[in-house]
Amino acid sequence: MLDHQSKIFRIQTLNHISSTGLNRFPAHAYQVGHDVEQPDAILVRSHNMLSMTIPSTITAIGRAGAGTNNIPVQEMSRRGIPVFNTPGANANAVKELVMAGMLLATRGILPGMAYVQSLTHMTDAAEMSALLEKEKARFAGGEIKGKTLGIVGLGAIGSMVAEMALAMGMKVVGFDPALSIDAAWRLSNEVTRMENLPALLARSDYVSLHVPAMDATRHLINADALAGIKPGAVLLNFARETIVDSAAVQRCLDAGRLGRYVCDFPEPAMLGHAKVIAMPHIGASTEESEENCAVMAANQLMDYLENGNITNSVNFPAVRMERTPGTTRISFSNDNVSGVLGHVLSVLAEHKVNVIDMMNKSRGELAFNIIDVESRPDDAVAAAIQAVEHVIRVRVI
């Protein structure tokens, strides 16, 4: 697929996107809206794109949020289209709701409030006060201070949850087999790293899940895992519904081994269960979070469309190269096999196109390349690069 820079970039939005983010796109260079035709890029939040026909003009997709299970990422990889997300932009919002979830599960807040609201028939304040003093023991709970929180997934959100829990006087243990170097630097040295999930579950009074939804994490919390969980523990799921086998969780609740299940992904079978606290997927639903995600997604899309730079892509390698003044930029994606870059450089040499600077990065089966050239190549050069075996998509910027 061969793409040339449009005079005006066209961005199609598939959800309501915060105006703070949309305003990042300069009006003289971008057309943005839900009904934009022949879009160069898509900006999406939760819209399900899995069965959507994605236009051939698309060169990038930006997700204003962390999860990308609503986007056909593998198909986009085959088409040479990077999919961006915004890790960490909604981390504080989720972190705060995790704390609320722990407190709601520990104290008799919800049943106590419901009881108070049931007393609308009473008219005497002194009588109500005496009654509440008598009944309040029914809603007594515990404290989280001194308890152990186990965090599964120590990325942007998990590390912030850990910091918050430590500040509240909790002990924190964590497990993350894919912990990145950046995440490790963010993590407090007061967090005890566990070698495996069973060890964490056996030790934790609270377990908070913060891993992405993927094949490897599907039903990570299943019957086998729950069999070893600390009796009476509280399980919190503010990650994704597929990470938990809800039927196994319900059986564990009914058996009395699991104390509470707090989730942001309600399922019909869970509704009405006395030990379930279900929220309507509001983990990232704050004004601040939506603005942060929109701004971050917009900035990443613009940098890719204008410069070919890739930051926070879930399917492409991270690539960033400063523009060389007075040059034209060529970017191309290809299957990660040997010899492709050499063939492309040969094409440029044959057409007497002088290379000023270049960068090549790979990730799994994909490679991505940025080449700054002295003068703008004509269509024949771009077409010749596209014709190189294993080249997926070429852009002249």
Image (spheres, grey):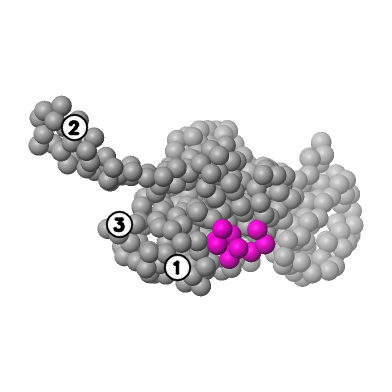
The part of the image, by quadrant, that contains residue 344 is: bottom right
- Is residue 198 found inside the magenta-colored segment of the image? yes
Q: Residue at 76% across / 66% down in the picture? A: 336
In this rendering, position of residue 355 left or right of residue 249: right
Q: CA distance from mark 1 to mark 2?
A: 45 Å
Q: Which residue is mark 1?
A: 245
Label ID, residue 130: 2
Q: Are marks 3 and 1 in contact (CB under 8 Å)?
A: no
Q: Earlier in the sequence, mark 1 or mark 2?
A: 2
In this rendering, position of residue 287 left or right of residue 390: left
Secondary structure, magenta segment, majority class: helix
Q: Check disc 2: other Cα within 10 Å, few if <14, some if 14-19, many if 20+.
A: few
In this rendering, position of residue 356 left or right of residue 110: right
Camera-near label (1 vs 2) is 2
Q: CA distance from mark 3 to mark 1?
A: 18 Å
Please state which amino acid type lies under the numbered disc 1: Asp
Give the answer, above or below, for where 75 lies relative to 320.
below
